[in-house]
Image (cartoon, rainbow, N blue to C red):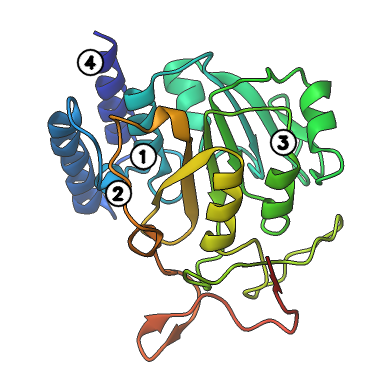
Amino acid sequence: MKTFRSVLSIVVYKISRFTKKNLLSDFFLLMRFLFSWNFAKDRKIRYINKFELRIYSQNGEDGILQTIFYKIGTKNRYFVEFGVGDGNECNTRFLKEAHNWKGLWMDAKYKSNDIKKELVTKENVEKLFKKYKVPKNFDLLSIDIDGNDYWVWEAIKYYKPRVVVIEYNSVYPPPIKVAVKYDANFEREADNYFGASLSALEALGREKGYTLIACDSNGINAFFVRSNLVKDRFLIDTIVNIYKPPKFGLKLDGKYVGYKKSKREMISI
């Protein structure tokens, strides 16, 4: 019954957000999601990108997260997401609205009844979690701060989210391990100097007890699941096959290369 309600909520919310401009594309993605869901119920999932579906997220994260939690279950339906903007387009809004999840939204520029205006740094991240009474073990952490993502995740020691979604810099393919130089007051410019490469994040995740299971097709977000929850639920591919190159920014010879080259240099991890 829970599975039926979960799928029904996806159908209802997705149809409610169909647009004339993207009608055929939206319909196709919904049908692909439902078809894949039907065949994945009792099987290990390998090609999780088939479950991409955008409701309130930017790159299909809604469908991927729905599928991950269908496979691993939930503990307390609590999320933490920072870098949510104004909250209209983020990774946890669908869970909050459709499935009554609760949690903490933070952003450095926006403030509302739902969003705490906080600049998250490696020095204060766990203090902020404590301030807002985040449980030690919670279901989902989503990090998208366009800069110190690697360093902030590294600094989270006490808290143990079951799933982590984090933006990666897809300009740097495996096996390159780089990240921005840490600066608590980092400011993003319109260039390729941001975040960390997938290989750097995968190595960090492994140290913290997580397994990389997917990247969205646009080369924006990486999805990690606690390693003890992976068995019998997901078939894990190599990082080279999981990695997705950028589908954003500028094009060179018909191929996306991200944004313009930065004068700042990423550092090796």
Task: For marks 4 and 1, give the CA distance.
Answer: 17 Å
Q: Earlier in the sequence, mark 3 or mark 1?
A: 1
Task: For marks 3 and 2, give the CA distance.
Answer: 27 Å
Q: Is residue 248 left or right of residue 145?
A: left
Residue 238 picture quarter: bottom left
Residue 73 picture quarter: top left
Q: Residue at x 49, y 52 (%)?
A: 221
Query: Horizontal and vertical percent for residue 38?
Result: 14, 30
User: Which residue is under mark 4?
Assistant: 4
Q: Residue at x 50, y 15 (%)?
A: 75
Kindly state the secondary structure of the residue where label 1 is placed: helix
User: Which residue is under mark 1?
Assistant: 64
User: Which residue is under mark 3?
Assistant: 106
Q: Amino acid at mark 1?
A: Ile
Q: Is residue 87 left or right of residue 51?
A: right
Q: Amino acid at mark 2?
A: Asn
Instruction: Kindly indicate whether the residue at mark 3 contacts the one at mark 4 (C-beta within 8 angstroms).
Output: no
